[in-house]
Image (tube, helix red, strand yellow):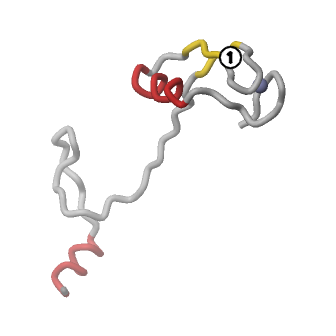
Amino acid sequence: MNCPYCNKELEIDPIVFSNVAIYQKPVLAVTRCCSHGVIVGAVITYRVTEYTGTATEDDWGNPIKRKKSEDTKRTNT
Ligand SMILES: [Zn+2]
């Protein structure tokens, strides 16, 4: 990530990123590369992948539909 001021590799105290991750609020910080003020905020992305474990309910207690192919696989092993 490049600095929006000097356009070199952005240098910020790592504690800034930890703080944003923990408190989930943007913060004002000074860059180490050129001492300008920047707002540092988190961009959250989500990854959804197929569940292949053996749980029968999700984390809220909703029943998980099992795939027919997995039932067959399980009885064969
Ligand atoms: Zn800079």
Q: Nearer the viewer, residue 6 or 57?
A: 6
Q: Secondary structure at mark 1?
A: strand
Amino acid carrying label 1: it is Val
Q: Residue at x 20, y 38 (%)?
A: 60
Height in image: 17 above or below 77?
above
Query: In the picture provided, is 70 more to the left or to the right than 21?
Result: left
Query: In the picture provided, is 7 more to the left or to the right than 13?
Result: right
Q: Residue at x 32, y 59 (%)?
A: 51
Height in image: 8 above or below 23?
below
Height in image: 45 above or below 53?
above
Looking at the rendering, which quadrant does residue 27 occupy?
top right
Query: In the picture provided, is 27 more to the left or to the right than 32?
Result: left
Number of labels in the image equals 1
Ligand 1 position by quadrant: top right
Q: Nearer the viewer, residue 11 or 49?
A: 11
Disc 1 target residue: 38
Q: Nearer the viewer, residue 42 or 30?
A: 30
- Which corner quadrant holds the C terminus? bottom left
Looking at the rendering, which quadrant does residue 37 occupy?
top right
